[in-house]
Image (cartoon, helix red, strand yellow):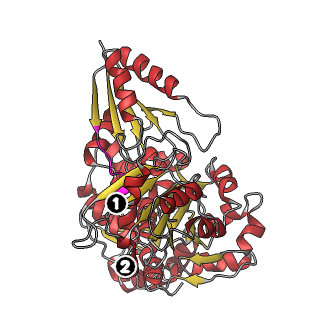
Amino acid sequence: MKGKVYLIGAGPGDKGLITQKAVKILEKADVIIYDRLVNPDIIKEIPQNIEKIYSGKKGWKKHTSQEKINKIMVNLAKKGKIVARLKGGDPFVFGRGAEETLYLKKYKIPFEIIPGITSALSCPVYAGIPITHRGISSSITIITGNEDPSKKESSINWNAVAHTRGTLIILMGMMNLNKITERLIKEGMAQETPVCIVMEGTHNHQKTLITNLKDAYRDCKKQGFKQPAVIVIGSVVNFKKDLEWFETRPLHQKKIIITRALHQSEEIKDSLTDLGAVVYEIPSIEIIDSNKSRKKLYKIIKNSSSYDLIIFTSANGIEVFKNHLDRIGYDSRWFGDKKIAVIGEATKDKLLNEFKIKADIIPEDYISESLAKEIIKHKHSVRKAILFCAERTGEILTRLLKKKGIDIEILPLYRIRKPKQTKKLFYRIRNEKIDYIIFTSPSTFINFFNINGTRQFLKKLKIISIGPITSKTIRRYGYKVYLESKKHSISGILQFLCRGIV
């Protein structure tokens, strides 16, 4: 039984610009063959069980040839596989999509084409340039810049292109920019014609350059502009100064490292990305179930009547606890009329999301001392409390409560360790010019600090801390805290960043 090949456009770079139909196909495919310009975050979100084959190239470096890609698609489809051929932009806009589908047709392989948003249309928009405007530009001409415009037999009518009254968009033209601009001027296009170069368009490290036809090559060389870039030529470029939006976001091009556990980093990563930041995920912790206390935990779950106060000090604790509760067949009714105390906005939200229960006790400040004060106010209704937390934590809270005569038991649910890939991820970005690094707990800092090479690296960065306990740890190791969130939460950090204080 033959399989099928889907030729899919991944869009220009911003992962949000891939279509819903494309995402559905990627989730059901057996194999994905993807190019260099596909956003790595799109690949990251594809289920692990799906085979992924990289076929990209950069410049003239070694890569998978077009002939080999064609054969791989056919061979996989003949084995009955669903193949997703994922290409940057739109596969039928200078993407060799027609070549690949004709090859599939030759071997009678079923195929389907999922269009993508082409960089020719989207990159100008992200630069604040309308590619058409009534009375100024009523047409668009899109050409490839790969072809040398100085050769005798050109497939492009340069004279017609030079005299277009609309907007001219050139893709893949940076290597031939000097020859392209010279040819357009030679054919009669005015030297002063406005030009905008959009490099890495729709990505948060997008850079734009406003120039004119005569100076475009010189200015690009001076400012280091290179592929991938879209060249926009025409009067519509003049709208950029009034219609800019993407590059005016508060954190545009700011490079920020987040060190949270991977399963917790999505919210802060997406929020920082929306603000314009280039985000690097280097998780310095991961959460592992504590096998030591499992038997005791199950005993407590089955005989919970002696506890009237349940304390959670992290969202991780709630997640691990719920997993165990599910495993032995209990749900939110287990809490009954017990009071629940939590530290932190994330913990409060996690309790509500997982169990549909609101916490009874939440301190204003997200530290152990403040939680202890709030619990002590309810002392008269607490016979016995239990604290679910991480290994080697919770000592401060239990000591403060025991001093006030509250009977409290501590049960570690999980432990924290450094992920194996942390060092490798750091080495990939150690030469980048990073602006900020965010630490959300003492352990995220300590684990990052203990990677070979990070100690001098940290001295160059502005360190953002989630709260006083984390800040205290950072200072104890001899580093300055540039900013500490007053709310001691991720939302508190984001509020500072949104206001542009950083």
Which residue does the image show at 52% across and 45% down from the upper left? 146
Q: Residues within 10 Å of mark 2 (few under 14, many from 20)?
A: many
Q: In the drawing, does residue 369 fall left or right of residue 164? A: right
Tag count: 2
| Quarter of the figure with residue 352 | bottom left
Which residue does the image show at 51% across and 50% down from the upper left? 293
| Quarter of the figure with residue 311 | bottom left
Question: In the picture, which quadrant includes the C terminus?
Answer: bottom right
The residue positioned farthest toward the top in the image shown: 1
Tell me the kind of residue under disc 2: Ile
Which residue does the image show at 40% across and 61% down from the upper left? 123
Q: Which mark is residue 139?
A: none
| Residue 399 appears in the rendering | yes
Judge whether 320 appears above or below 256 on screen.
above
| Residue 384 appears in the rendering | no
Q: Residue 488: x and y, percent?
A: 48, 79
Q: Is residue 209 magenta?
A: no
Q: In the drawing, does residue 292 fall left or right of residue 48? A: right
- Helix, strand or loop at label 1? It is loop
Q: Which mark is residue 362?
A: 2
Q: Which mark is residue 164?
A: 1
Q: In the drawing, does residue 419 fall left or right of residue 295? A: right
Q: Residue 277: x and y, percent?
A: 49, 69
Nearest to the observer: residue 13 or residue 267: 13
Nearest to the observer: residue 307 or residue 463: 463
Question: In the picture, which quadrant includes the N terminus?
Answer: top left
Tell me the kind of residue under disc 1: Thr
| Quarter of the figure with residue 91 | top left
In primary-sequence order, the first of circles 2 and 1 is 1
Judge whether 343 appears above or below 352 on screen.
below
Nearest to the observer: residue 336 or residue 435: 435
Q: Which residues are magenta?
A: 114-122
